[in-house]
Amino acid sequence: MKLRYFAWVRERIGKPEEEIELPAGIATVADLMTWLSERGEEYAYAFENPKVIRAAIDRAHVRADAAIMGAREIAFFPPMTGG
Amino acid sequence: MATVRLQRESFDAASEAAQLRRGRGDIGAIVTFTGVCRQDEAGAPLVAMTLEHYPDMAEAEIARHVEAAERRWPLLGVTIIHRYGRILPGEDVVLVVTAAAHRQDAFAAAEFLMDYLKTRAPFWKHIEFAGGGRVGEKVWVDAKHADDVLADRWLPGRRAAE
Protein backbone atom coordinates (compact mmCIF):
# COMPACT_ATOMS: atom_id res chain seq x y z
CA MET A 1 0.00 0.00 0.00
CA LYS A 2 1.38 3.39 -0.98
CA LEU A 3 1.16 6.32 1.40
CA ARG A 4 1.62 9.88 0.19
CA TYR A 5 2.11 13.01 2.26
CA PHE A 6 1.64 16.64 1.26
CA ALA A 7 2.45 20.11 2.59
CA TRP A 8 3.48 20.29 6.23
CA VAL A 9 2.52 16.66 6.80
CA ARG A 10 5.25 15.74 4.31
CA GLU A 11 7.68 18.17 5.91
CA ARG A 12 7.15 16.77 9.40
CA ILE A 13 7.44 13.16 8.32
CA GLY A 14 10.40 13.97 6.09
CA LYS A 15 9.36 12.13 2.95
CA PRO A 16 6.73 12.54 0.23
CA GLU A 17 5.70 8.90 0.03
CA GLU A 18 6.41 5.36 1.10
CA GLU A 19 5.25 1.80 0.60
CA ILE A 20 4.07 -0.02 3.69
CA GLU A 21 2.94 -3.47 4.66
CA LEU A 22 -0.26 -2.97 6.53
CA PRO A 23 -0.40 -4.97 9.75
CA ALA A 24 -3.58 -6.80 10.65
CA GLY A 25 -6.16 -4.96 12.70
CA ILE A 26 -5.86 -1.60 10.96
CA ALA A 27 -9.34 -1.10 9.55
CA THR A 28 -9.89 2.62 9.11
CA VAL A 29 -8.05 5.79 8.17
CA ALA A 30 -8.15 6.81 11.85
CA ASP A 31 -6.57 3.47 12.85
CA LEU A 32 -3.86 4.03 10.26
CA MET A 33 -3.04 7.49 11.60
CA THR A 34 -2.75 6.08 15.11
CA TRP A 35 -0.46 3.28 13.89
CA LEU A 36 1.68 5.72 11.92
CA SER A 37 2.00 8.01 14.96
CA GLU A 38 3.70 5.19 16.81
CA ARG A 39 6.36 4.62 14.14
CA GLY A 40 8.49 7.54 15.22
CA GLU A 41 8.67 11.11 16.52
CA GLU A 42 8.31 12.63 13.11
CA TYR A 43 5.08 10.75 12.50
CA ALA A 44 3.76 11.62 15.96
CA TYR A 45 4.49 15.28 15.19
CA ALA A 46 2.70 15.11 11.83
CA PHE A 47 -0.38 13.46 13.32
CA GLU A 48 -0.36 15.21 16.69
CA ASN A 49 -3.76 16.71 15.92
CA PRO A 50 -5.52 14.06 13.85
CA LYS A 51 -8.71 16.10 13.62
CA VAL A 52 -6.89 18.54 11.39
CA ILE A 53 -5.52 15.91 9.00
CA ARG A 54 -7.44 15.12 5.82
CA ALA A 55 -7.17 11.90 3.85
CA ALA A 56 -7.82 10.59 0.36
CA ILE A 57 -8.07 6.97 -0.70
CA ASP A 58 -7.26 6.31 -4.35
CA ARG A 59 -7.47 10.05 -5.03
CA ALA A 60 -10.89 10.72 -3.51
CA HIS A 61 -11.61 12.45 -0.20
CA VAL A 62 -12.60 10.16 2.66
CA ARG A 63 -13.46 10.63 6.32
CA ALA A 64 -11.45 9.26 9.20
CA ASP A 65 -13.86 6.35 9.68
CA ALA A 66 -13.43 5.15 6.08
CA ALA A 67 -12.32 1.54 5.63
CA ILE A 68 -8.88 1.18 4.09
CA MET A 69 -9.18 -2.40 2.90
CA GLY A 70 -8.42 -2.63 -0.80
CA ALA A 71 -6.91 0.85 -0.99
CA ARG A 72 -3.94 1.18 -3.32
CA GLU A 73 -2.93 4.70 -2.36
CA ILE A 74 -3.73 6.68 0.77
CA ALA A 75 -2.74 10.33 1.06
CA PHE A 76 -2.60 12.51 4.17
CA PHE A 77 -2.57 16.29 4.06
CA PRO A 78 -3.67 19.45 5.86
CA PRO A 79 -6.90 21.27 5.00
CA MET A 80 -6.64 22.51 1.46
CA THR A 81 -5.95 26.07 0.39
CA GLY A 82 -6.50 25.98 -3.35
CA GLY A 83 -8.41 28.44 -5.47
CA MET B 1 -18.08 20.46 -22.80
CA ALA B 2 -15.76 21.31 -19.92
CA THR B 3 -12.09 22.22 -20.01
CA VAL B 4 -10.02 21.64 -16.86
CA ARG B 5 -6.29 22.42 -16.92
CA LEU B 6 -3.61 22.49 -14.28
CA GLN B 7 -0.49 24.38 -15.35
CA ARG B 8 2.48 26.37 -14.12
CA GLU B 9 2.10 29.13 -16.67
CA SER B 10 -0.29 32.02 -16.49
CA PHE B 11 -3.35 32.19 -18.67
CA ASP B 12 -5.31 34.76 -20.66
CA ALA B 13 -8.80 34.96 -19.17
CA ALA B 14 -10.30 36.89 -22.08
CA SER B 15 -8.93 34.45 -24.63
CA GLU B 16 -10.27 31.44 -22.71
CA ALA B 17 -13.74 33.02 -22.48
CA ALA B 18 -13.61 33.85 -26.21
CA GLN B 19 -12.80 30.24 -27.04
CA LEU B 20 -15.66 29.02 -24.90
CA ARG B 21 -18.24 31.20 -26.63
CA ARG B 22 -16.99 30.94 -30.21
CA GLY B 23 -19.83 30.01 -32.54
CA ARG B 24 -22.30 29.46 -29.69
CA GLY B 25 -25.52 31.30 -30.42
CA ASP B 26 -27.22 29.62 -27.45
CA ILE B 27 -24.98 31.31 -24.86
CA GLY B 28 -26.60 34.37 -23.32
CA ALA B 29 -24.35 34.72 -20.28
CA ILE B 30 -20.66 34.19 -19.61
CA VAL B 31 -19.13 34.70 -16.19
CA THR B 32 -15.35 34.94 -16.03
CA PHE B 33 -13.81 34.85 -12.56
CA THR B 34 -10.09 35.29 -11.98
CA GLY B 35 -8.41 34.68 -8.61
CA VAL B 36 -5.34 36.83 -8.19
CA CYS B 37 -2.33 36.66 -5.84
CA ARG B 38 -2.56 39.66 -3.54
CA GLN B 39 0.56 41.49 -2.44
CA ASP B 40 0.02 40.70 1.22
CA GLU B 41 -1.14 37.81 3.36
CA ALA B 42 -2.64 38.59 6.76
CA GLY B 43 -1.36 42.14 6.48
CA ALA B 44 2.28 41.26 5.75
CA PRO B 45 3.81 41.84 2.29
CA LEU B 46 4.92 38.73 0.46
CA VAL B 47 7.62 38.01 -2.09
CA ALA B 48 5.90 34.97 -3.59
CA MET B 49 3.24 32.36 -3.02
CA THR B 50 3.89 28.75 -3.98
CA LEU B 51 1.16 26.23 -4.66
CA GLU B 52 1.89 22.60 -3.98
CA HIS B 53 -0.64 20.12 -5.36
CA TYR B 54 -1.53 16.44 -5.55
CA PRO B 55 -1.43 16.15 -9.32
CA ASP B 56 -3.26 12.87 -9.87
CA MET B 57 -6.06 13.85 -7.54
CA ALA B 58 -6.44 17.53 -8.42
CA GLU B 59 -7.68 17.01 -11.97
CA ALA B 60 -10.08 14.25 -10.93
CA GLU B 61 -11.43 16.27 -8.03
CA ILE B 62 -11.95 19.43 -10.10
CA ALA B 63 -13.64 17.36 -12.82
CA ARG B 64 -16.03 15.96 -10.18
CA HIS B 65 -16.93 19.51 -9.11
CA VAL B 66 -17.54 20.49 -12.72
CA GLU B 67 -19.81 17.46 -13.21
CA ALA B 68 -21.71 18.44 -10.08
CA ALA B 69 -22.15 21.98 -11.41
CA GLU B 70 -23.33 20.67 -14.78
CA ARG B 71 -25.94 18.46 -13.07
CA ARG B 72 -27.14 21.33 -10.97
CA TRP B 73 -27.34 24.13 -13.56
CA PRO B 74 -28.03 24.04 -17.31
CA LEU B 75 -24.49 25.07 -18.29
CA LEU B 76 -23.38 25.41 -21.88
CA GLY B 77 -19.67 25.48 -21.12
CA VAL B 78 -17.14 25.48 -18.27
CA THR B 79 -13.44 26.22 -18.25
CA ILE B 80 -11.28 25.94 -15.15
CA ILE B 81 -7.56 26.65 -15.10
CA HIS B 82 -5.64 26.31 -11.84
CA ARG B 83 -1.98 27.22 -11.66
CA TYR B 84 0.60 25.58 -9.40
CA GLY B 85 4.20 26.39 -8.56
CA ARG B 86 5.67 29.74 -7.68
CA ILE B 87 3.38 32.73 -8.20
CA LEU B 88 4.22 36.41 -7.73
CA PRO B 89 1.98 39.13 -6.29
CA GLY B 90 -0.33 40.48 -8.95
CA GLU B 91 -0.31 37.29 -11.00
CA ASP B 92 -3.40 35.26 -11.80
CA VAL B 93 -3.86 32.01 -9.89
CA VAL B 94 -7.17 30.48 -10.93
CA LEU B 95 -9.74 30.95 -13.69
CA VAL B 96 -13.37 29.86 -13.68
CA VAL B 97 -15.47 30.53 -16.77
CA THR B 98 -19.11 29.44 -16.91
CA ALA B 99 -21.53 29.85 -19.80
CA ALA B 100 -25.30 29.45 -19.81
CA ALA B 101 -28.39 30.74 -21.58
CA HIS B 102 -29.18 32.96 -18.57
CA ARG B 103 -27.09 34.85 -16.06
CA GLN B 104 -28.44 33.33 -12.81
CA ASP B 105 -27.06 29.91 -13.79
CA ALA B 106 -23.69 31.26 -14.95
CA PHE B 107 -23.20 33.33 -11.76
CA ALA B 108 -24.35 30.59 -9.38
CA ALA B 109 -22.21 27.89 -11.02
CA ALA B 110 -19.10 30.10 -10.98
CA GLU B 111 -19.55 30.83 -7.28
CA PHE B 112 -20.23 27.17 -6.50
CA LEU B 113 -17.09 26.11 -8.37
CA MET B 114 -14.89 28.69 -6.62
CA ASP B 115 -16.27 27.79 -3.18
CA TYR B 116 -15.40 24.15 -3.83
CA LEU B 117 -11.99 24.93 -5.32
CA LYS B 118 -11.17 26.81 -2.13
CA THR B 119 -12.02 23.90 0.15
CA ARG B 120 -11.72 20.59 -1.70
CA ALA B 121 -9.19 20.94 -4.49
CA PRO B 122 -5.90 19.40 -3.30
CA PHE B 123 -3.61 22.43 -3.38
CA TRP B 124 -1.64 23.95 -0.49
CA LYS B 125 -0.19 27.44 -0.44
CA HIS B 126 2.95 28.60 1.28
CA ILE B 127 4.19 32.14 1.44
CA GLU B 128 7.64 33.73 1.39
CA PHE B 129 7.33 36.99 3.31
CA ALA B 130 9.07 40.19 2.29
CA GLY B 131 10.17 41.63 5.57
CA GLY B 132 9.28 42.59 9.11
CA GLY B 133 11.13 39.76 10.77
CA ARG B 134 9.57 37.12 8.58
CA VAL B 135 12.07 37.30 5.72
CA GLY B 136 13.10 33.87 4.51
CA GLU B 137 10.39 32.24 6.56
CA LYS B 138 8.28 29.74 4.67
CA VAL B 139 4.79 29.77 6.06
CA TRP B 140 1.95 27.49 5.12
CA VAL B 141 -1.34 29.34 4.69
CA ASP B 142 -4.09 28.06 7.00
CA ALA B 143 -7.40 27.03 5.54
CA LYS B 144 -10.08 29.52 6.46
CA HIS B 145 -13.20 28.53 8.32
CA ALA B 146 -15.01 31.21 6.32
CA ASP B 147 -14.29 29.25 3.13
CA ASP B 148 -15.82 26.11 4.65
CA VAL B 149 -18.91 28.12 5.56
CA LEU B 150 -19.18 29.39 1.98
CA ALA B 151 -18.82 25.87 0.55
CA ASP B 152 -21.43 24.52 2.98
CA ARG B 153 -24.03 26.91 1.53
CA TRP B 154 -24.24 24.64 -1.50
CA LEU B 155 -25.15 21.49 0.43
CA PRO B 156 -28.60 20.04 -0.22
CA GLY B 157 -31.29 21.71 1.82
CA ARG B 158 -29.54 25.08 2.11
CA ARG B 159 -32.09 27.08 0.11
CA ALA B 160 -30.26 30.41 0.39
CA ALA B 161 -27.70 29.28 -2.19
CA GLU B 162 -30.25 28.67 -4.97
Image (cartoon, rainbow, N blue to C red):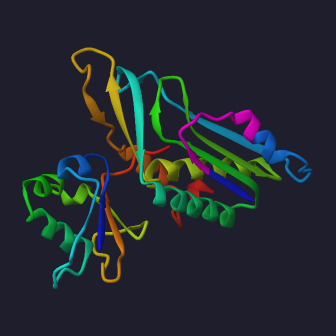
Q: How many marks?
A: 0
Range of residues picked out in magenta: B5-16
Q: Residue at x 33, y 26 (%)?
A: B128
Please provide percent x and percent y for residue A46: 18, 53
Question: Could you tell whether B28 is left or right of A34 in the image?
Answer: right
Please provide percent x and percent y for residue B127: 35, 31
Q: Which quadrant of the figure contains the N terminus of chain B?
A: bottom right
The answer to which quarter of the image holds residue B91 is top right
Q: Residue furthest top?
A: B132
Q: Residue at x 70, y 52 (%)?
A: B78
Camera-side residue of B120 and A59? A59
Above or below, A9 relative to A21: above
Question: Could you tell whether A50 is left or right of B1 in the image?
Answer: left
Magenta region includes residue B7: yes
The answer to which quarter of the image holds residue B44 is top left
Question: Could you tell whether A5 is left or right of B46 in the image?
Answer: left
Camera-side residue of B22 and B151? B22
Question: Could you tell whether B84 is left or right of A45 in the image?
Answer: right
Q: Residue at x 17, y 55 (%)?
A: A49
Q: Which quadrant of the figure contains the C terminus of chain B?
A: bottom right
Magenta region includes residue B69: no
Camera-side residue of B104 and B1? B1
Please provide percent x and percent y for residue B25: 92, 50
Q: Residue at x 33, y 68 (%)?
A: A74
Above or below, B89 relative to A6: above
Camera-side residue of A3 and A49? A3
Please provide percent x and percent y for residue B6: 56, 48
